[in-house]
Image (tube, coloured by chain):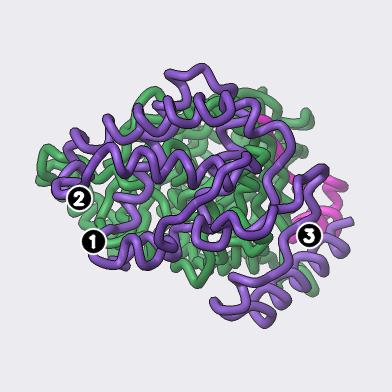
Chain colours: A purple, B green
Amino acid sequence: MRTLLTALGLAAAFASALALTPASAQTAAAPAVASTTPPPVGNGADNAGMIRPAPEGLYQALGEKAGIARLMDDLVARAVVDPRIGPIFKDTKQQALKDSLTLQVCVLTGGPCVYEGDNMKAAHADFAITKGDFNRLVELLQFAMDAQNIPFTQQNRLLALLAPMHGDVITRR
Amino acid sequence: MHASNHFTALSALCVGALLALPAQAETGKLLLTGGVSTITGAAGGGITPWAVIGTQASEGEVGMSAFATRVGTLDYALKSYGAAVAIHDRVEVSVARQDLDAGPAVALNGIAPFGIEPNPHLKMDIIGVKVKLLGDAILDAHNLMPQIAVGVEHKRLQPGSLGSVMDFLGVNRTGTDLYVSATKLLLDKGLLLSGTLRYTKANQNGLLGFGSAAPGSDSYSLQPEISVAYLLRRDLAIGAEYRFKPNNLQSLGFAAGLGDALREDDWKDVFIAWAPSKNLSLTLAYVDLGRIVPGVAPRRQTGYYLSAQAGF
């Protein structure tokens, strides 16, 4: 048992070390998702940062487009006054940001929206954003989802769709 | 004495730096994503390190943490306390002291004139360094690539009046473990998986020295360690750990006519960890440390584990 586990561990360590460069890690096959909605074409999903199809039930759990709009309203309101990341938003048109985020999350969660904004890299290139800043926004999103009584398991499914954007959003490593 | 001075100096440095920190704590990590402090000081679970770099600091930040842990089993008690510094979410340096109340060992005086004084304690100082090699355990939610780190733990045992027993066992009083860890949070499921491979010849984590006088049992071996944790809430996780252990001393005890007296078992626990704030976490666990010198304490050493960690 111990030998088997050791061998498995060694094999996994070697596979991890050899298999993936940063570039190929981005395009590594996503694990099979139990039930998914295939992404429609032409809705700006690529720019929205969609990497894998939306998990079933998430769009509904978020309250569909109206619920997502409430969520993004709350998130932006928290972000612009946050002691840590508020300054990043000092020149941001807040309503435009709320609308854009709503469309983006709607598209990512399989809703019937079209995202016409910039891709994540372009949208954030002019800002100084560290990993700590990114994590703080994630935290504020968690607070906003708590305030909307979104169940913890559904919260994590949304975060799993957004977290991989860290590669494009974080500009200060 | 020399090693003790180094350890004291490092600890003083940690405490001094902790006190000198500005009021604004480094809080760039999400709750619980820096792990808790293992009993050797490295960040991870309770008894096995993870690939995450500890403290609450994120990239570009420097963080510190301190912990105190108490373990109580049927016949033994262990205190452990220490501190860690984390730099840019890349390097973690930790110091820890373990203090095992080895009361049952007094019975060894009945086997041979070891001269063990009453209330014997085994103390061990540990200095650890961990380096993150690649990956992001938390944010790379789009693939199965784990975060990978390598680490080293250098341990120095001060056996006190149990020194004569260590000499009899022919064990070293210092030793170094090397390990590689892979850790991944399956974010959409709230499930954390971590595996560690440790290259070690420590007996009972080093508390019974390193290696053995028995031929064929004095070499390093690879020991796997596994953690699983499930997030119930942002601030609350439950989990289990299993740590395989070498068993270097059993054959020595057998050769000395003591049967299984020195047999060593794997360690396991189930735990619950709660982070009431970014700067504090509390962990409670039920541990099963197996047999620890069953020659004097034949029962499996089950009991509680309680730990508090403050992070900046």
Q: Tell me the number on the disc at residue A88.
A: 2
Q: Secondary structure at mark 1?
A: loop
Q: Chain of mark 3?
A: B
Measure the alpha-carbon separation of dots 2 and 3. 65 Å
Earlier sequence position, callout 1 versus callout 2:
2
- Nearer the observer, B83 or A12: A12
Mark 1, mark 3: which one is toward the viewer?
Answer: 1
Q: Tell me the number on the disc at residue A127.
A: 1
Q: Is residue B114 visible?
A: no
Crowding near pointer 3: few (<14 within 10 Å), some, many (20+)?
A: many
Q: Is residue B271 left or right of residue B36?
A: right
Residue that mark 3 sits on? B252
Q: Are marks 1 and 3 in contact (CB under 8 Å)?
A: no
Mark 2, mark 3: which one is toward the viewer?
Answer: 2
Crowding near pointer 2: few (<14 within 10 Å), some, many (20+)?
A: some
Residue stretch rendered in magenta on the structure? B247-270
Q: Position of residue B32 (x, y in %)?
A: 46, 38
Kindly indicate whether the residues beneath marks 2 and 3 are on one polypeptide chain.
no
Task: Tell me, yes or no, whether the highlighted magenta stretch contains residue B261.
Answer: yes
Q: Secondary structure at mark 3?
A: helix
Q: Residue at x 54, y 76 (%)?
A: A22
Q: Residue at x 40, y 33 (%)?
A: A72
Crowding near pointer 1: few (<14 within 10 Å), some, many (20+)?
A: few
Q: Chain of mark 2?
A: A
